[in-house]
Image: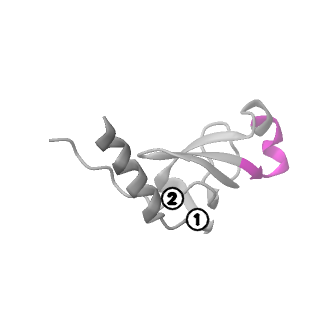
């Protein structure tokens, strides 16, 4: 039996801060572009001038452990549309 993924509470679009790691000398902030099981891809838009070369070399993106991320502003999470779920079910019945 496969293990169920752990709910991280992180969502695409969340504005976050992250702890420094690797080549970074300071903490940085940004927006989540993608959420993985134990980490997330952060689009860096708030950083110390001392880290500008590092941010540039990393193309303004960094993969950060979930434990090192703090959500500053949560993105709105859309409610699932029940009509869309019914359409998906009907496609399966056609096969």
Q: Find numbered disc 2 in the image and state the secondary structure of the residue it sits on.
A: loop
Q: Looking at the picture, does residue 16 appear above or below residue 38?
A: below
Mark 2–mark 1 contact, CB under 8 Å?
yes
Residues packed near mark 2 inside 10 Å, few (<14), some (14 to 19) or many (20 plus): many
Q: Nearer the viewer, mark 2 or mark 1?
A: 2
Which callout, 2 or 1, points at the residue further toward the start of the chain? 2
The residue that label 1 is drawn on is 71
Q: Find numbered disc 1 in the image and state the secondary structure of the residue it sits on.
A: strand
Q: Looking at the picture, does residue 81 appear above or below residue 60?
A: below
Q: Is 10 on the left or on the right of 43, as rendered?
A: left
Residue 17: name its quadrant.
bottom right
Name, please, the residue furthest toward the left. 1
Would you say residue 79 sits in the magenta stretch? no
**Residue 80 in view:** yes
Q: Which residues are magenta?
A: 44-54
Q: Quadrant of the N terminus?
A: top left
Q: Looking at the picture, does residue 66 appear above or below residue 63?
A: below
Q: Looking at the picture, does residue 14 appear above or below residue 23?
A: below
Q: Quadrant of the C terminus?
A: top left
**Measured Cα–Cα span from mark 2 to mark 1:** 8 Å
Give the residue drawn at x 85%, y 48%: 49
In this view of the protein, which residue sits in the foreground, 28 or 24? Answer: 28
The residue that label 2 is drawn on is 10
Q: Where residue 23 sits: x, y (%)?
A: 67, 36
Q: Is 64 on the left or on the right of 28, as rendered?
A: left
Would you say residue 52 sits in the magenta stretch? yes
**Residue 28 in view:** no
Q: Where residue 53 sits: x, y (%)?
A: 81, 35
Give the residue drawn at x 38%, y 58%: 7
Give the residue drawn at x 75%, y 34%: 59
Q: Where residue 58 sits: x, y (%)?
A: 71, 33
């Amino acid at each position: 039996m496969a293990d169920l993924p752990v709910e991280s509470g992180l969502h695409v679009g969340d504005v976050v801060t992250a702890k420094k790691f690797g080549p970074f000398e300071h903490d940085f902030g940004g927006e989540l572009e993608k959420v993985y099981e134990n980490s997330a891809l952060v689009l860096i838009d708030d950083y110390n001038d001392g880290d500008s070369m590092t941010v540039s070399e990393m193309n303004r993106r960094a993969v950060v452990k979930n434990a090192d991320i703090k959500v500053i502003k949560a993105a709105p999470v859309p409610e699932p549309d029940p009509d869309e779920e019914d359409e998906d079910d009907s496609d399966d019945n056609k096969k």
